[in-house]
């Protein structure tokens, strides 16, 4: 009698373990299926971001620069101020600029890739 009870207990334990493994695998399969469309959407999202990364130029007056933070704030002709984070060669340009300088900032979103200081304007007065 003890052997029969022992065999039944082992059978129940084995069935419970198999059931638990099957239950554990099903949510993982559901997660994998759910992640595939997300990965598919991400693949389609990358080309949509490409046009946003197009380089643009903004002309304006330097409001402030912060060499330590690698940032420059520029006020454009319409009076809007924008802060850009300098990258690459633009970082070296920050040290040469001060508030009030006229600049052209080549940027993608908020990353400045090139900063060019405008040439000093001539006074236009003739010496007569």
Image (tube, grey):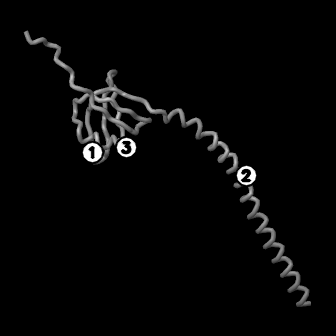
Q: Secondary structure at mark 2?
A: helix
Q: Nearer the viewer, mark 3 or mark 2?
A: 3
2 or 1: tag closer to the N-terminus: 2
Counting residues from the N terminus, which is met first, the one under dot 3 or under dot 1? 1
Q: Position of residue 4 (x, y in %)?
A: 91, 86
Neighbourhood count class around disc 2 (C-alpha, 10 Å): few under 14, some 14–19, many 20 upward: few
Identify the residue position indicated by label 2 in the image: 33
Taking 48 as reference, is 32 above or below it? Answer: below
Q: Is residue 96 left or right of residue 32?
A: left
Q: Residue furthest left?
A: 128
The residue lying at 44 percent from left, 35 percent from top is 109
Q: Which residue is mark 3?
A: 87
Q: Nearer the viewer, mark 2 or mark 1?
A: 1
Point 84% across, 81% down: residue: 10
- In the shown orientation, is residue 60 left or right of residue 121? right
Badge 3 marks a residue whose secondary structure is loop
| Alpha carbon separation for disc pair 2 and 1 | 48 Å
Label of residue 76 in the image: none
Residue 95 higher or lower than 60, as above or below:
below
Q: Which mark is residue 67?
A: 1
The quarter of the rendered structure image containing the C terminus is top left
- Residue at coordinates 28% horizontally, 48% vertically from top-left? 68
């Amino acid at each position: 009698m003890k052997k029969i009870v022992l065999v039944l207990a082992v059978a129940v334990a084995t069935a419970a373990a198999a059931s638990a493994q099957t239950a554990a695998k099903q949510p993982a399969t559901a997660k994998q299926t759910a992640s595939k469309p997300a990965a598919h959407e991400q693949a389609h999202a990358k080309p949509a971001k490409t046009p946003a990364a197009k380089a643009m130029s903004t002309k304006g007056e330097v409001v402030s620069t912060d060499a330590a933070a690698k940032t420059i704030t520029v006020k454009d002709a319409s009076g809007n101020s924008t802060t850009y984070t300098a990258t690459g060669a633009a970082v070296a340009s920050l040290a040469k600029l001060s508030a009030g300088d006229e600049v052209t900032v080549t940027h993608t979103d908020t990353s400045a890739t090139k900063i060019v200081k405008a040439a000093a304007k001539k006074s236009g007065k003739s010496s007569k």
